[in-house]
Image: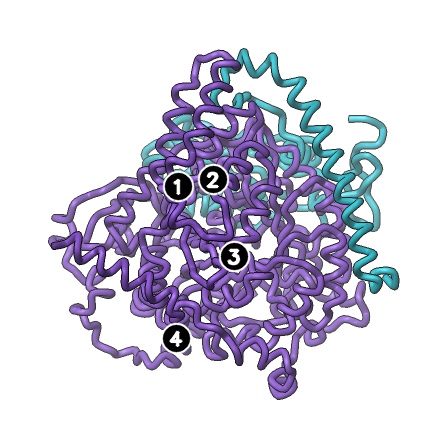
Amino acid sequence: MDRRDREAEYKQNAEQEAVRLQMPENMQVNVTDPLLAPYHRTMEEIEKMPVLEKTKTVCPVCKLIVDGIIYKDGDNVMIRKYCPEHGWFIEKYWEDYEMYMAMRGYSYFGRGFDNPDYLTAGENCPFDCGICERHKSHTALANVVVTNRCHLSCWYCFFYAKENDPVYEPTLEELDMLFKKLRSQKPIPANAIQITGGEPTIRSDIVDIIRLAKEAGFDQIQLNTTGINLGLNPELLVKLRHAGLSTLYMSFDGVSKRANPKNHWEIPLILDAARKAGVGIVLVPTVIRGVNDNELGSMINFALNNIDIVRAVNFQPVSLVGRMPDRLRERQRITIPGAIKLIEEQTGGVVAKEDWFSVPYIGGLSKFVEALTGAYSYDLSIHFACGAGTYLFLDKDNKVIPITRFLDARGLMEYLQHVVDEMEGKSRLERHLMALKALLNLKKFIDKDKQPKSVNFAKLLGSILLKHDFSSVGAFQMKTLFLGMMHFQDEYTYDIARVEKCDIHYSLPDGRVIPFCTFNVFPEIYRDKVQRQYAVPAEEWQKQHPAWTYASDKYRRNIKELEANPLYEKTYGHLVNFFELPVNRAVKEAEKATASEGAK
Amino acid sequence: MNANEGVIEEGGKYYAVENGERYRLPYKTVKEIVFNNVSKQELVDLQHAARLQYKLLLNEAILRAKVEFVKQRISIVYNPPGYNKGKPEISPEGIAALIRQEGVHVDLASAEQRDVDYYAEIWRAQFHPPMIREHPPYGYTLDEWKKMKDKYEQKVKQAREKKLEEFHEWQKRYEQEHPELASR
């Protein structure tokens, strides 16, 4: 099945999905709907709107590189592009103007590779990728695909082998080579890796793969999985942990059965297995408007209920890769601020819009640590529109406290950046004295009365800055829940300025390293093409593995049995709603009162 | 390259060998064709040149393509007929026709062609790229960094060894907590 067939199948599935969502094809677009209105203005109206940035993007149809105009439409930030052959394309870029401007302030250029791919100079970016000398971020998270086989067959996914498709599975030696290549990046070797698929646990040598990654020197090893095989086989998870696995990066699209048909019934088993094995979990919801966007608050609440084992919720607003009906795309599109605003609504303001910061915000901290210690530090210099995050503390009295409520995060970063600027050109001794003075000043940015009772945040922050290693961050995370947002691009939102700064990379079997959104948005020239070069035809795979059939990979669920398991009731039947507890409601009401006082 | 490195063929398949380990090579020898003096009018502009590159790369037999608008040059690394069994192939005429489909005419007679050793020129280049520049840590000049570098690298090596040691100690403790591991 080639890409066109898959696109046709996807389109058909998407249309069926539209029907399922009760959106008849001939439905009249209601342009008064504020969600859809920005898509349905006249070009005359659009061209009058204030332009915020100019960038380069691609035509979703023919891939011509065209100018992208990022402009303000009311509260929305939109991108428009014009292809001489295919006309205008309008897409939502960021659903909150104020937040866009605030986050833009954290933007900076990081360092790419000092040993980039020299076979390309990147003149025709994004069509001559390997990370080249013009790329502006190092690899912060490396993705390595270990199989294209999967035990599920999700309608929206292109990323698994269908029946009779070639099977892609690099050998252990080849994976070891990829790991070593990633670790040899200069000046900052990749230190976090995500083993991904297909479903990686379908490989019988998955434990060996994790062991190899650990031996190659990765500190943070994640497994991108549905978790189903691990819930059903908890011993496998113990073996993986022993081999060096740090975290399960686990698909989790909602608390209810409807929102999360993928692994709702197995989640209780997976949590139990992870507790026994001592493996942390990152819940990874793909957020689709109209499908599971009503469960964002309950997903955070679910994570808080399992904070002993869940380290983070990393929301991924859907990337609508592949051509799909415009109307469906407009309805399903959600961007980072769109999801953040829904979280504010659904948590009753406990996690508010103001609590989030852009990922490159961390840059100030990294620069300070580096200037202080003389040791390279992770940059996280991605484009500000790619990701956002915040930390929640769950205090002894069940109070949920976002970090920004007691830390002047913006002030702190501005101060640290100022110190780094001042350090330039000074002697080492002077720099150290300045850094020490800065460390003593940190407490000025912390409101002790508002910080969680269980944490001395000034001490914790000092220890992160002084120790400058993962163990400090680990200790920090054990008391918190990290909330992340990562919005991967598609052909409609594509912005080459974002791609140039990407720090989530894929390692290809031919040795190239490619940004996430190049790898997945143009699979026909990267992902699929290169994997086909290394894949084994289905007949050959069958000969090599006589006991294997395509059907034998597939998981068959017994819902009755899973629901009868006492863990099911324990997991879903007694959830505390943290956002409705008096201790959290009281905070909300007090804040509302202060706000209205201020307004008066 | 040392004696432990090179390419071997086994059962009609190619493997790169490095430090005694084998890695599959999809190709052994491929070809490069370079068309010079391509008409700027036909390439249109930088953006159209980039799209032409994209379209060329859609062909399975084209491994690399570079369309340089300013230099009026198109370079293509491809798998020619009869070179690598079982892999999609394309002839120079096929390439010229493909480019022509996109409205660009190239002169096949004056094109430069050469064999490319996939392992030496592509595979190794991608797995072992050399350093082309050096960024010092933030707050340091390159001169300062050069003085610190050896010590820093030594420290990183030691820290790595220490971390691995700690991990192995942790593994032992973990084995005690999880006796089921003994049965593996």
Can you tell which mark lies on residue A458?
2
Q: Which residue is the site of mark 3?
A: A312
Q: Which percent across, then down, holds residue A561?
A: 65, 86
Left or right: A544, with B57 as reference point: right
Q: Earlier in the sequence, mark 2 or mark 3?
A: 3
Q: Nearer the viewer, residue A13 or A191?
A: A191
Color of chain A here?
Answer: purple
10 Å crowding of disc 1: few (<14), some (14-19), many (20+): many
Q: Which residue is the site of mark 1?
A: A446
Chain of the residue displaying label 4: A
Q: Which residue is the site of mark 4?
A: A15
Q: Nearer the viewer, mark 4 or mark 2?
A: 2
Whether pointer 3 and pointer 4 mark residues with C-beta atoms closer than 8 Å, the reply is: no
Residue at horizontal 57 percent and vertical 75 percent from the top: A571
Chain of the residue displaying label 2: A
Q: Callout 4: helix, strand or loop?
A: helix
As measured in the structure, the alpha-carbon distance from the residue carrying label 1 to the one carrying label 2 is 7 Å
Residue at horizontal 67 percent and vertical 55 percent from the top: A146
Color of chain B here?
Answer: cyan
Left or right: A90, with A311 as reference point: left
As measured in the structure, the alpha-carbon distance from the residue carrying label 3 to the one carrying label 4 is 33 Å
